Image (tube, rainbow, N blue to C red):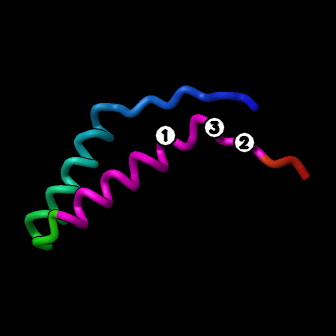
Amino acid sequence: MKQYKIKITELTEKDLERAGDYIAYELKNPTAAVNTVRGIRKQINSLTNFRREMN
């Protein structure tokens, strides 16, 4: 299986932080903010082992 290197840009980091802050402070749900940002990071990291299915 081919491995890929995933680079998270500075802009992406800022977007994740803003999304987390919005959920935590505007929606007043810090637990959901942490879970959401962790979930997004987990999905991004899973792309390193992404495999394209051939038909």
Whether residue 30 is situated above or below residue 50 in the rendered picture: below
Which residue: 21% across, 47% down? 17
Q: Is residue 42 magenta?
A: yes
Say left or right for 50 vs 43.
right
Whether residue 47 is situated above or below residue 6 in the rendered picture: below
Which residue: 24% across, 56% down? 34
Q: Residues within 10 Å of mark 1 (few under 14, many from 20)?
A: some
**Which stretch did the figure color magenta?**
31-52
Q: Position of residue 41 (x, y in %)?
A: 39, 46
Q: Is residue 12 magenta?
A: no
Distance from Cα at disc 1 to Cα at disc 2: 13 Å
Among all residues in the image, which is located at the extreme bottom? 27
Whether residue 12 is situated above or below residue 28 in the rendered picture: above
Say left or right for 37 vs 8.
left
Examine the residues drawn in magenta and state their main secondary structure.
helix
- The image's mark for residue 55 is none
Task: State the residue position of label 1.
Answer: 45
Which quadrant is the N terminus positioned in? top right
Distance from Cα at disc 3 to Cα at disc 2: 6 Å
Say left or right for 26 vs 52.
left
Q: Quadrant of residue 49?
A: top right
Label 3 with label 2: CB-CB less than 8 Å = yes
Task: State the residue position of label 2.
Answer: 51
Q: Amino acid at mark 2?
A: Arg
Q: Amino acid at mark 3?
A: Asn
Q: Position of residue 38 (x, y in %)?
A: 34, 51
Q: Amino acid at mark 1?
A: Asn
Q: Position of residue 21 (x, y in %)?
A: 14, 56
Distance from Cα at disc 3 to Cα at disc 1: 8 Å
- The image's mark for residue 49 is 3
